[in-house]
Amino acid sequence: SQSYATVDSESGRISGNGGEITNGVISNVNCVITPAVSWITIRYPLVLPDAHHDFGIVVAQNTSSIGRIGRVYIKNSDTQETLATIVITQEGLVESLSVTPSVINFDATGGTATFTITSNTNWTIEDGTN
């Protein structure tokens, strides 16, 4: 008989922050679930025949503001034939930066102050005096 693998969902979408998408597959042969890109890993990648198999598609944070697409293949363990493909679409990372406190006041004598910058992107500080 011909080898097959049927996935619960042939596509997935995830935010730029990354995370895990749960999917499932049933096949009539031993299979291995293999990502085609380095930013996707698989939790529980080995599939035994004739039973529904749940697995996780773990997607790393996208460090770019540009979205990306990656594929995951379900392959026959013996022949490496691709039996099913899942397309994962990841949004670009929404860049953020916050400063705490947001306002620092000095009296006429000047002084020093401490503040915290939290960001998921690169940033620089420039002197804003005129």
Image (cartoon, rainbow, N blue to C red):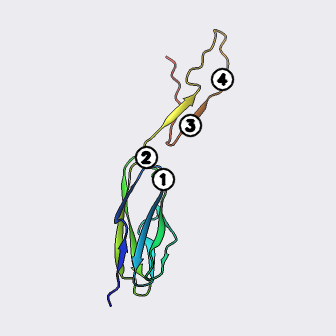
Relative placement, left or right, of 112 versus 119 is: right
Mark 2 lies on residue: 93
Q: Amino acid at mark 1?
A: Gln
Q: Amino acid at mark 3?
A: Thr
Mark 3 lies on residue: 118
Q: Is residue 130 above or below residue 79?
A: above
Q: Nearer the viewer, mark 2 or mark 4?
A: 2
Separation of disc 1 and disc 4 at Cα?
Answer: 33 Å
Using the image as rendered, state which of residue 104 and residue 46 is in the foreground.
46
Mark 1 lies on residue: 61
Residue found at the very far left of the displayed protein: 2
Q: Residue at x 63, y 8 (%)?
A: 108
Instruction: Identify the mark at residue 113; answer none if there is no mark.
Output: 4
Separation of disc 1 and disc 3 at Cα?
Answer: 17 Å
CB contact under 8 Å: marks 1 and 2: yes
N-terminal of the two: label 4 or label 3? 4
Q: Is residue 70 above or below residue 66?
A: below
Relative placement, left or right, of 73 versus 18 is: left
Q: Amino acid at mark 2?
A: Leu
On the image, the x and y values in percent for residue 85 come to 35, 71
